[in-house]
């Protein structure tokens, strides 16, 4: 998937990394090679709930960071993961926050 996707300043690439314990989200501007916004459920203050619920909270945190930088659309990079479970819920949480991809 990565070779087909490219993020810009106006439309960064949101990558999802899913480990056995945590979910990491990162919005990247590939033109400059810099991270625009990032969050993971490891840094959440309130780490209660299922892994999916914590991933949704992380997605909401990334959405707030992106909205503060006036970014309204993304390129969703799910990596090698299937679009279900935590990955799907992250995408749904970002859509619910008003971001498009």
Image: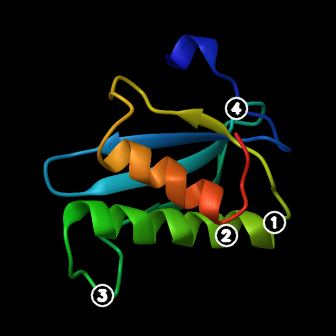
Closer to the chain start, of discs 3 and 2, is 3
Classify mark 3: residues with Cα within 10 Å, few (<14), some (14-19) or many (20+).
Answer: few
Q: CA distance from mark 1 to mark 4?
A: 17 Å
Residue indicated by mark 1:
69
Residue 88 located left or right of residue 101: left
Give the number of the disc on residue 30: 4
Closer to the chain start, of discs 3 and 1, is 3
Element class at badge 1: loop
Above or below, 83 relative to 36: above
* Residue located farthest toward the top when viewing the structure as drawn: 3
- Does the CB distance between marks 4 and 2 fall below 8 Å? no
Residue indicated by mark 2:
65
Element class at badge 3: loop
Element class at badge 4: loop
Q: Quadrant of residue 31?
A: top right
Give the number of the disc on residue 46: 3
Closer to the chain start, of discs 3 and 4, is 4
- Does the CB distance between marks 1 and 4 fall below 8 Å? no
Above or below, 59 relative to 4: below
Place of residue 99 in the rendered image (x, y in percent of width and height, measured from the top left): 72, 55
Classify mark 4: residues with Cα within 10 Å, few (<14), some (14-19) or many (20+).
Answer: some
Q: CA distance from mark 3 to mark 4?
A: 32 Å
- Does the CB distance between marks 1 and 2 fall below 8 Å? yes
Residue at the spot 63% in from the left edge and 21% down from the top edge: 5
Q: CA distance from mark 3 to mark 2?
A: 18 Å
């Amino acid at each position: 998937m990565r070779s087909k996707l490219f993020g810009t300043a106006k439309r960064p690439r949101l990558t999802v990394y899913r480990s056995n314990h945590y979910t990491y989200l990162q919005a990247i501007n590939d033109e400059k090679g810099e991270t625009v916004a990032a969050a993971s459920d490891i840094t959440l203050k309130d780490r209660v709930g299922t892994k999916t619920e914590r991933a949704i909270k992380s997605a909401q945190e990334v959405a707030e960071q992106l909205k503060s930088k006036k970014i309204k659309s993304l390129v969703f990079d799910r990596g090698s993961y299937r679009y279900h479970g935590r990955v799907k819920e992250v995408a749904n949480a970002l859509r619910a926050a008003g971001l498009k991809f």
